Image (spheres, rainbow, N blue to C red):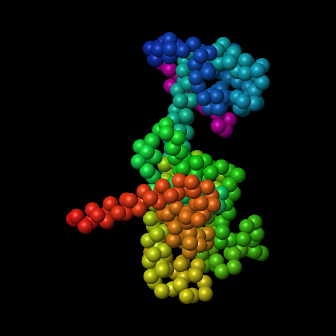
């Protein structure tokens, strides 16, 4: 049968020491509860009838452990304990653990890869008004107490962790900004937004909403944003010095400029579809002062003290330069 596991003699443990050690460390029922249920049920369903003690196969309809009622769960445990030999149980245990290790390795590889869809989603999050306060806090200069408060014991919140939660939240739906959503022409091809024909040819397949992206943490948001910010800052500064800002379609000029530059990832072409000039100018900065005040990020009652301290710092730096 397709997908059926061939349990030949080599798949069983022929080493009495291995089986004895396994059984000594865990009873059959205890071992059952230690194994991944999804993989365990899969291997029980694949087990040939002749490999069971009573010659009957496992229940083919038992697909997911969480969907089984208590009676079905009891039958599964009874099958494992009473209808399998020690050797077969050990062979299944080994295969479940091997499959789990492979699954974990695949997930680790998937997490290790940051693709253009992930980066585009992070760019959307950077200009999302609902995350503005967090971004401002993330890029604002920290005082000594905040820098030393690594474990949050002093009440410091690592804003990149909060941004990661927003990044992972599937209700935050971002869509490709250079094509018309959910529409296609007569040939089934995408329809570019007006004025974005050139960038759409490169970026029509970018999906900043992709719901199957791996969960990210604050460290990933921090490091990935630093990479995006550093390259975008250089590209935009060079673009502004290139003298092509008077053209009618700046998006086309941006694309032409990056193409001449060479070796630029698609996501940096895409950035110009969602970033304004102001967004580029404050890539690595906190929100403007008046916006921070409005958002409650600056405590107006302590403003005079902060200004006085900043003036004192400037005076100290000035005097230090004079002494040099």
User: Residue 33 in the image: x percent, y percent?
Assistant: 61, 21
Residue drawn at the location 41% of the way across and 48% of the way down: 144
Is the N terminus in the top left, top right, bottom left or bottom right quadrant? Answer: top right
| Residue 26 higher or lower than 288, as above or below | above
User: Residue 43 in the image: x percent, y percent?
Assistant: 63, 29
Residue drawn at the location 46% of the way across and 46% of the way down: 146
Residue 242 visible (yes or no):
yes
Q: Viewer-proximal residue, 168 or 312?
A: 312
For residue 148, what is the image quadrant? top left
| Residue 40 higher or lower than 294, as above or below | above
Residue drawn at the location 61% of the way across and 69% of the way down: 274
Asked whether 99 falls inside the magenta stretch, the response is no
Residue projecting furthest to the left = 324
Asked whether 2 falls inside the magenta stretch, the response is yes
| Residue 314 higher or lower than 23, as above or below | below
User: Residue 264 in the image: x percent, y percent?
Assistant: 47, 70
| Residue 177 higher or lower than 46, as above or below | below
For residue 120, what is the image quadrant? bottom right
* Residue 58 falls left or right of residue 250: right
* Residue 30 falls left or right of residue 308: right
**Total number of numbered labels?**
0
User: Residue 253 in the image: x percent, y percent?
Assistant: 54, 82
Q: Viewer-proximal residue, 188 or 207?
A: 207
- Magenta region: which residues? 1-14
């Amino acid at each position: 049968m397709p997908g059926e596991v061939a349990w030949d003699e080599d798949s069983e443990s022929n080493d009495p020491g291995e089986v004895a050690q396994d059984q000594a460390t865990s009873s059959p029922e205890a071992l059952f509860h230690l194994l991944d249920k999804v993989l365990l049920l899969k291997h029980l369903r694949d087990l040939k009838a002749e490999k069971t003690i009573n010659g009957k196969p496992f229940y083919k309809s038992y697909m997911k452990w969480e969907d089984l009622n208590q009676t079905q769960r009891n039958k599964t445990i009874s099958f494992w304990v009473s209808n399998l030999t020690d050797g077969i149980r050990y062979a299944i245990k080994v295969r479940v653990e091997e499959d789990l290790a492979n699954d974990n390795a695949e997930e680790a590889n998937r997490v290790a890869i940051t693709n253009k869809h992930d980066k585009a989603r992070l760019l959307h999050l950077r200009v999302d008004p609902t995350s503005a306060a967090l971004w401002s806090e993330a890029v604002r200069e920290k005082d000594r107490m905040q820098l030393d408060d690594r474990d949050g014991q002093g009440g410091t919140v690592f804003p990149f962790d909060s941004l990661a939660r927003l990044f992972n939240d599937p209700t935050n739906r971002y869509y490709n900004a250079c094509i018309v959503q959910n529409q296609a022409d007569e040939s089934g091809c995408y329809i570019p937004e007006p004025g974005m024909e050139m960038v759409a040819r490169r970026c029509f397949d970018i999906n900043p909403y992709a719901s199957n992206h791996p969960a990210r943490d604050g460290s990933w948001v921090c490091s990935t944003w630093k990479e995006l910010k550093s390259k975008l800052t250089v590209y935009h500064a060079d673009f502004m010095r290139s003298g092509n800002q008077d053209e009618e379609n700046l998006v086309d000029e941006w694309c032409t400029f990056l193409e001449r530059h060479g070796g630029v990832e698609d996501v940096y072409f895409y950035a110009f579809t969602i970033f304004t000039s102001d967004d580029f100018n404050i890539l690595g900065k906190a929100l403007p002062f008046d916006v921070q005040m409005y958002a409650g990020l600056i405590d107006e009652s302590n403003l005079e003290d902060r200004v006085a301290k900043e003036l004192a710092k400037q005076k100290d730096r000035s005097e230090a330069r004079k002494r040099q």
